[in-house]
Amino acid sequence: MLTIMKKSRRHLLIAAAGLAVTGSMIVSPAVAQDKIKAAVIFGVNNPGAVNGWDRGHFNGVQKLIKHYGWDVDIAEGVPFPQMERTAERYGEAGYQVVIFTSSGQIRAWNAVAPKYPKTIFAMMSTTGSLPKSDNVVAYAPDFFSYGVLNGLVAGQATDSKKIGFVAGLAVKAVEDMWSGIVEGAKVVAPDVEGTYGFSGNWTDVPRAREVTDLQIRGGVDVIIGNAGDGTLGILDAAKTSKVKFIGYATDWSADAPDTVLTSVLLGMEQWYDALAKEVESGEVEPGINTFGVESFTVMPLNDKLLDAGRIAQINDSVRRYQSGDLKIPAVRHEVKK
């Protein structure tokens, strides 16, 4: 389900000759007249290399390029202190669209967007508010319902009655996801115990593995990983200890066929598709566009790791939740930062 939280009725108009904001025409000097000139800012290097959040964004960017014919610059490995200046350079150069890929970039989004009203600044991550500007839009998943799907799977897949969640940092999206995991697991397995841990960043593979090993030694036999590049350490620990792993955001099945139970896809290409369609239709309305449970996909469960009966039960609970037959109210579970 896609819900839209309207923040303004003012429209941003894209004309064939360039970008027009409420009637004033802008022609980008850096782009041919028939292409949208855009930039995407990543905090990691080589975002398509590792499965998960950044590869999901990278795949979305490829859709802008290959399907819509956009001219897209990709800025990789931009540290948080340099986000603002990087975005400013694109605004100064007359880029029509600038895309932020992480909620850690919200400060730069808030600071830069009002300075360049002729550029659309899009946040492709969780946010609860918009910058004080009319040239902004956000696309993000409902991380609570995403977490519920993970919890429904993990709660019914565990034999030890202990499930684990390892993330990079305790950001809002992670807290929302953890809340969903707890509530989802509780519905299908009230006696299951959940535990969480943080690697401290989104890049430290050894540290992520260490945190995961601690959970496994405590009896966890299903692990959900969301630690950026560090998720490779989570997967490695799961593989070594022969516990089940649930992949985050994109499909992890090929990374460890005997370890990955399933992956819960965020469907991030849908966000980029929505942005492109709004831009190319000539109208972008400022607001927070939230993609709900119907936009997520639970990949086929690994029959090497579960029997057919349990797989059928999990699939049924997922189906009922996505159809609305299984109601799970949002309950917040705070995490210690």
Image: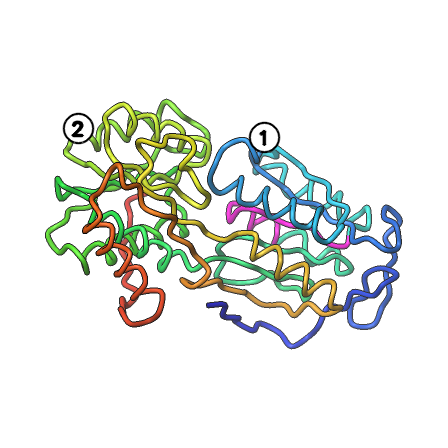
> In the figure, is residue 197 to the left or right of 89?
left
Residue range (magenta): 96-109
Q: In x, y percent, where is residue 160?
A: 12, 39
Mark 2 surroundings: few (<14), some (14-19) or many (≥20) residues within 10 A: few
> In the figure, is residue 170 to the left or right of 82?
left
Query: Is residue 138 placed above or below 95 in the rendered structure?
Result: below
Give the residue drawn at x 31%, y 57%: 148
Mark 1 surroundings: few (<14), some (14-19) or many (≥20) residues within 10 A: few
- Residue 217's mark? 2
Q: In x, y percent, where is residue 158?
A: 18, 43
Residue type at the position of mark 1: Asn
Q: Within the magenta stretch, is there residue 104? A: yes
Model colouring:
rainbow
Residue type at the position of mark 2: Arg
Give the residue drawn at x 24%, y 38%: 305
Nearest to the observer: residue 79 or residue 168: 168
- Quick one: which residue is furthest to the bottom in this view? 9
Q: Quadrant of the C terminus?
A: top left
Give the residue drawn at x 37%, y 55%: 146
Nearest to the observer: residue 204 or residue 253: 253
Q: Label 1 vs label 2: CA separation?
A: 32 Å
Q: Are marks 1 and 2 in contact (CB under 8 Å)?
A: no
Q: In x, y percent, where is residue 320?
A: 29, 66
- Quick one: which residue is furthest to the left in this view? 191
Q: Which residue is mark 1?
A: 45
Nearest to the observer: residue 276 or residue 20: 276
Query: Is residue 57 placed above or below 16 in the rendered structure?
Result: above
